[in-house]
């Protein structure tokens, strides 16, 4: 079995969702996560495989960057809003975002271009946006934006 085949060991295709998925240890998260790759039944593209390989080899912990991006997004978008759960609490630090987040997953989009930077998304459910969840978009290991999951545009890179 070649490297390309070994990379997808444990992944299965989810036909109703049109993605490949596996629960794997993701070093940049420091834990196991569902990893989802938006690809047809025939398999991920070479760029998606390269992105997965890079993500699974990246040693730096990116959780703090996710926490800080979420705190900044909350401050800009939600701090003045009164969600259904009551008044929005102030966030003193990036660590304060985690109680409002759940169901984390790493997502590799179906890219428009066959080559480009390392791009991936960290998706999560959020009490701040219960209808859509949130997405932290990474481009070359830096946060490129925070959006609702349906508005994240990693595929454009």
Image (spheres, rainbow, N blue to C red):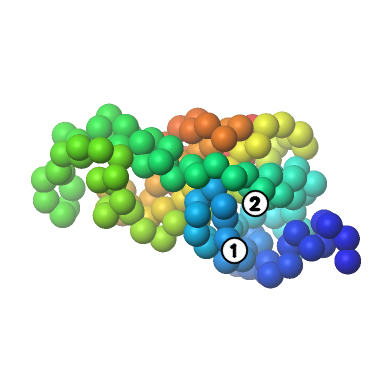
Q: Position of residue 112 (x, y in %)?
A: 70, 37
Give the residue pinned by disc 2. Answer: 56
Q: Specify the farthest residue to the front.
A: 59
From the image, which quarter does the N terminus lie in? bottom right
Task: Report whether 72 appears left or right of 120.
Answer: left
Residue occupying image coordinates x 40% and y 46%: 134
In terms of secondary structure, where does tag 1 sit? Answer: strand
Q: Is residue 133 above or below residue 112?
A: below
Q: Are marks 2 and 1 in contact (CB under 8 Å)?
A: yes
Viewer-closest of 7 and 13? 7
Residue occupying image coordinates x 76% and y 34%: 115
Q: Specify the farthest residue to the left.
A: 87
Residue occupying image coordinates x 50% and y 51%: 29
Q: Which comes before the other along the chain, label 2 or label 1?
A: 1
**Neighbourhood count class around disc 1 (C-alpha, 10 Å): few under 14, some 14–19, many 20 upward:** some
Residue 98 visible in rendering: yes
In terms of secondary structure, where does tag 2 sit? Answer: helix
Residue 148 visible in rendering: no
Give the residue pinned by disc 1. Answer: 24
Q: Is residue 49 above or below residue 22?
A: above
Q: Specify the farthest residue to the right.
A: 1
Cα–Cα gap, marks 2 and 1: 9 Å
């Amino acid at each position: 079995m070649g490297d390309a085949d070994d990379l997808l060991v444990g992944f299965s295709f989810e036909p109703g969702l049109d993605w490949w998925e596996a629960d794997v240890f993701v070093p940049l998260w420091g834990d196991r996560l569902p990893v989802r790759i938006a690809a047809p039944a025939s398999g991920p593209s070479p760029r998606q495989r390269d992105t997965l390989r890079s993500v699974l080899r990246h040693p730096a912990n990116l959780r703090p960057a996710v926490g800080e991006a979420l705190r900044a997004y909350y401050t800009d978008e939600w701090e003045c809003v009164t969600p259904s759960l009551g008044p929005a609490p102030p966030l003193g630090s990036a660590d304060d975002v985690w109680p409002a987040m759940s169901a984390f997953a790493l997502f590799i989009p179906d890219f428009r271009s066959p080559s480009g930077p390392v791009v991936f998304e960290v998706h999560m459910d959020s009490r701040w946006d219960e209808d859509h969840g949130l997405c932290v978009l990474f481009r070359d290991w830096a946060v490129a934006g925070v959006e609702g999951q349906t508005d994240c545009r990693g595929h454009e890179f």
